[in-house]
Amino acid sequence: MAMWIGINRKARVCYGFDDISLVPGRVTINPEEVDISTTIGNIELKIPVLAAAMDGVVDPKFAIEFAKYGGVGVLNLVGIYTRYENPYEMLEKIITCPYEKSTSLIQDIYKESIKEKLVGERVEQIKKAGAICAVSCIPQYADRFIGICREAGADIFVIQSTVTTARHISSKYKPLDIKEFCKSARLPVVVGNCVTFDVATELIETGVVGILVGIGPGAACTSREVLGLGVPQVTATADCAYARDIYYKKTGRYVSVITDGGMVTSGDICKSFAAGADAVMLGSAFVRSVEAPGRGYHWGMATSDENLPRGIRINVGVTCTLREILFGPARVNDGSQNLMGALKLSMGSLGAQNIREMQMVEMAVTPSIKTEGKIYQSLLKSTSRNKRDKS
């Protein structure tokens, strides 16, 4: 649906997580009896979650630990883990640097050249531990890294950029042909990011097993502010999921839709699946864990851009273990812990037995829900003030 925004100019009405809520179902299911597993290509995940390919979130040790819980951590192949033999010295510099100098420091650190030897070593480290290994790089490095990663035993290869399309025009270099790449990769390929039906359709038709949905919604990303690009995640996910469904009906080949970024609470994750996602990719939720290499510090993938950085270093703090974030027990009531418990409870309340059924539940546009939430928050603040006054 479009509305007039000026003379002869229309804009679509789109919705984010705060604009909608999920309508309880006519049947409810015991949360322990719902199935939250998903597949990406031929890879089965016990939990439908990927940890984002950001250096403060996923290192080889985190990827190994995350795999134990049934998800997959995506390792950034153009980050510090493939540039430095000892990347943790660089992490320490980034974490301890004053905020106003952090972006320029990150730019300098990421100028170090990538070592192909380290690419293979990091993949082998994850695979030797028996974990599923997913790796990510920008399109310019895909041809260079695919053979190394395949030889080292990687399971999923992710090609990721701020905006990804099947057709890219450049007179300065030869663009990556995603369709030809998928034919020769001999590894499941996931690409992103996109937010529209048409682009999702063209990307799906290249032969990928999954697409990432989301441009600029992440906590550490400033692409929406810097470039003015983006579509709210509920609408973006729904549009891309429709492209997936049409393609599946035509061909019988299922391509996973992965909502990437913008999810602040467990409720947002639940809404992503209701909008059509098969899995979600999270960054800031996991950088809060004890196991994350960033120790509570988080920066966007484009923060290191030499000319136009589109990200900032943020400090979200360390709150608990990775297990507690995923499965509880929750020690705060802000929807940031026991994410999988919340997903199961939501699915049970909606009468959805699995992720595919969750994609078909009823949603409502509910701006009034935000008002009700403010009432709750004001009560909490009032209670807090009363306690301070008494003390």
Image: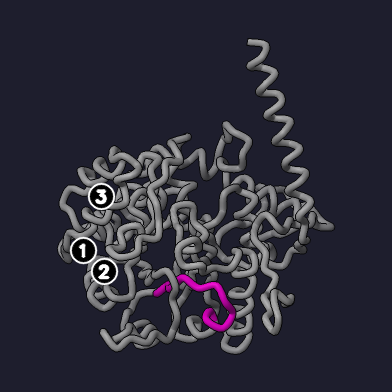
Q: Are marks 2 and 1 in contact (CB under 8 Å)?
A: yes
For the C terminus, the image quarter is: top right
Which residue matches tag 2? 149
Label 2: state its secondary structure: helix
Q: What's the amino acid at mark 1?
A: Gly
Considering only order in the chain, which callout, 3 or 1, is on the residue closer to the N terminus? 3
- The quadrant in which residue 143 appears is bottom left
Label 3: state its secondary structure: helix
Q: Is residue 227 magenta?
A: no
The span from disc 3 to disc 2 (Cα, nearest Å) is 29 Å
The span from disc 1 to disc 3 (Cα, nearest Å) is 27 Å
Label 1: state its secondary structure: helix
Residue drawn where x is 59% and y is 33% of the image: 332
What segment is highlighted magenta in the picture? 189-200
Image position of 322 with respect to 278: above or below? above
Residue 120 tag number = 1
The span from disc 2 to disc 1 (Cα, nearest Å) is 6 Å
Among all residues in the image, which is located at the extreme top?
Answer: 391
Which residue matches tag 3? 105
Q: What's the amino acid at mark 3?
A: Leu
